[in-house]
Amino acid sequence: MDAIKHLLSENIRRFGMIIALVGIVILFQLLTGGILLQPLNITNIIMQNSYIIVLAIGMMLIIITGEIDLSVGSVAAFVGAIAGVLMVQSELSVFASILICLLIGAVIGAWQGFWVAYVNIPSFIVTLAGMLLFRGLTLVVLDGQTIAPFPDGFRKMSSDFLPDILGGGQLQLFTLLVGVIVSVLYIIHEIRYRRNELKYNFKVAKVPLFITKLIVLVAVINIFTYVLALYEGIPYVLIILALLIIGYTYVMNNTVQGRHIYAVGGNVNAAQLSGIKTKKVKFLVFVNMGILSALCGLIFAGRLNAATPQAGNLFELDAIAAAVIGGASFTGGVGTVFGAVIGALVMGVLNNGMSLMGIGIDWQQAIKGLVLLSAVAFDVLNKNK
Amino acid sequence: MSQTILEMNSITKTFPGVKALDDVNLHVQQGEIHALIGENGAGKSTLMKVLSGVHPFGSYSGDIVLNGEISKFKTINQSEALGIVIIHQELALIPELSIAENIFLGNERAKKGIVNWNETITKTDKLLKKVGLNLSPQEKIIDIGVGQQQLVEIAKALSKNVKLLILDEPTSALNEEDSENLLNLLLDLKKQGITSILISHKLKELIKVSDSITILRDGKTIETLVNTNKDISEDRIIKGMVGRDLTNLFPERQHNIGEVVFEVKDWSAYHPVTVERKILNNVTINARKGEIVGIAGLMGAGRTELAMSIFGKSYGKKITGKVYKNGKEIDVRNVNKAIANGIAYLSENRKEFGLILIDSVKNNITLADLNKVSKNNIINPYEETKAAESLKSRINIKAPSINQETVNLSGGNQQKVVLGKWIYTDPEILILDEPTRGIDVGAKFEIYKIINELVDNGKSIIMISSELPELLGMCDRIYALSEGEITGEINREEANQEILMKYMTKGWGS
């Protein structure tokens, strides 16, 4: 009995936010009379939140190093504006424009990273300045106007779907196939991982538990792709997200750079005296945030099919909220990329669910604020126990 | 005299899964200095927290009898109202506030919320005189030394009409001179009728000042020794603490000393902020293969500054001088280069500069040389685990697993983790800055054994310590450092505390 209790409390801490997400989903599924989980709406939730998830990933890294970035919304707007100028006004090719935009994002990140890491100005100040600076520059670039429409090729990235090359009718067969392929890759990965652990004489889960875990996750993957297949299939933006999530998770867990990021956030003095170039780490994390802000700006502009002066307003707060709900700590050193994604989804489902219920934007804001506070309070209380 | 001011009877306190105190008894007489001693984790601090109301009445069993009455403290305020004041190991002063503001913090001299500064300052002045501090009440805490800060804490306690003063490791961060001062003050206060409970690891000072000594081990009272004549032997106390005879504080070692491996020549450095202040002046030292070289010096002599400036120029500005390894000059421009050239530095403050407390034992151990377990910057988790496991068992880190967060380990084991981190980088020269600060006798012995094992394997060790007996017990040769200059070099055979002290207090040019 004690063992079960222990297992439960351990897992509540580890999977607390996933459980909360599932709870919120079930709640709104009931409250909206089943609209929430309809294929169309699920696709919507993904696409509506894609740009916040992109930001949340970058923000998580920033918060892990013990910093903050308030400028991401303005930077996204600025890059969106540049994209408008390049593609619509200068008629530059989509590919070249995207490349230039990401590069600009990197330069902006380097600019802010320089002040934070090498001049030692608190990131709150640097990025507060950046928030004003880049919002202002957005207005300058756009001259206060909206630029539209974007070329089709660009819009695809944020609002189109993978074509069904298998030619299914109602059901997107190709999407189902992707689900199967991903499942197979996942199983292969898990088996290889287990083999390695056995080779090094590590403790591994017992075979029945291992197989149960595989079955559950394969089921989740395939139910998900099946639902997507019922509508238009896999959005392009989902592929971008999947690559980012897997890539950043890998970097944070398995590479020297990832370990250095955690170390800098955990104790910058100890990291420095262990030979880690702490300034460079902070600088690069800001460069990374700049690139992801740019990507966010591009996806958002594409989705809106316009570059507007108000784009990206309050995105920084959504991204910070997502990271914090997902387990980041402002003292630094703690958090996971996956957590940030879950955090973004919690906020996204709340938004979506409340909109479906017809709750006004006023109450939505208020409720989101309370959810943010209670998520963190829950975590703090849980840790103190 | 022999009236009991405090009785703690059969105190038992459990935390989830651990019995921190098990039927503990403590009887303190009016007007005495009562020492409380035990290894880390023996329950001293918990006992004092029970006494001062940090652990409120009801969360423990047993009785606290103060002046014949049972006390049921729910908060610290209640215990302070009765004159029990505790001064914690980590000082609780606010650096940016003045001495006067700190002393009356939470106890402001005010009427209707308006502070009476004249009264505050005059009262502070009186209190400072009482503790022998010749400072202005308006001086900021940040601008005075650690020893003086400790005295301010005591002044603060006096301002609260203290009857029973509890000091938790008051001298652990102080040099010999300041410690001496503080202990004299305690004796002074005793004359004025203030009772003290003194927690300390430094046996010598306990024996010198205390009237009785209560020994705790594993949450139990072992015994209370009477020390009216100040003649209890250290061995007697240690026997009680560890439950066995520790015939020698320092493990035996063969002295196989080879050629000079490491040399620092004409090393000078200036203060990082006030750049005209010279902190280190033409320091020249060396270390041989298989040798433990000590650096003795008072607080502020520049010991840590010397070590850190050598280790990747982590301290100071305008650093000049050369560092040689095996006769060749090496580059120590940054920490990376210093590590690559086989130097390791164990910092004096493991929590601030050594460990990532929220990270695991494993991640801490491999941090300084992740390349050893990675390929193309990708960490091999299996190799990493293997490396951490093998180090954990080699230096006997007591932790449930290598995935345990280091914040949950005892001081001694935390220190082993930091030491493990540097052993893992396989250095030739280890600079150990206060390697046994704040850890108990048993763990100290184990750290000494690890140090001995390292020199047996041909490493060179430079050891900085405030505890002269430790330097005398461990080192082959000791440099004395005073005001940034090497003032003496003494071999093992000739060294004793008096000689070291003489060189350590030698000023500029004298």
Image (cartoon, coloured by chain):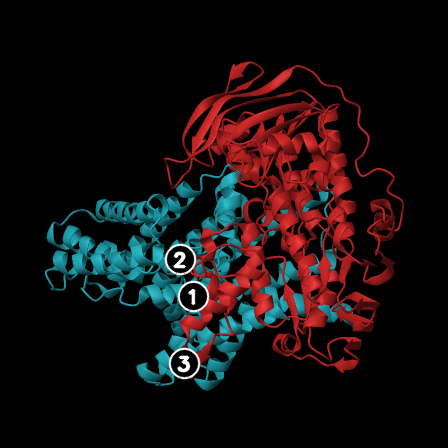
Residues B220 and A151: in front is: B220
Name the residue carrying label 2: A59
In percent of width and height, residue B206 lies at 75, 52
What subunit carries mark 1?
Answer: A
In percent of width and height, residue A378 lies at 55, 73
Q: Earlier in the sequence, mark 1 or mark 3?
A: 1
Q: Which chain is cyan?
A: A
Amino acid carrying mark 3 in the image: Ile
Residue A281 seen: yes
Residues A223 and B98: in front is: B98
What subunit carries mark 3?
Answer: A
| Palette colour of chain B | red
Give the class, few, some or many, for how many residues have Cα within 10 Å of label 2's Cα (few <14, many ≥20): many
Question: Quadrant of residue B466 in the image?
Answer: top right
Name the residue carrying label 1: A322
Residue sitting at x 77%, y 40%: B446
Name the residue carrying label 3: A367
Q: Earlier in the sequence, mark 2 or mark 1?
A: 2
Are the two marked residues, 1 and 3, in contact with CB atoms closer than 8 angstroms? no
What subunit carries mark 2?
Answer: A
Are the two marked residues, 2 and 1, in contact with CB atoms closer than 8 angstroms? yes
In the rendered view, tell whether residue B255 sits above or below residue A62. Answer: above
Q: Distance between the residues labelled 2 and 1?
A: 9 Å
Amino acid carrying mark 1 in the image: Ala
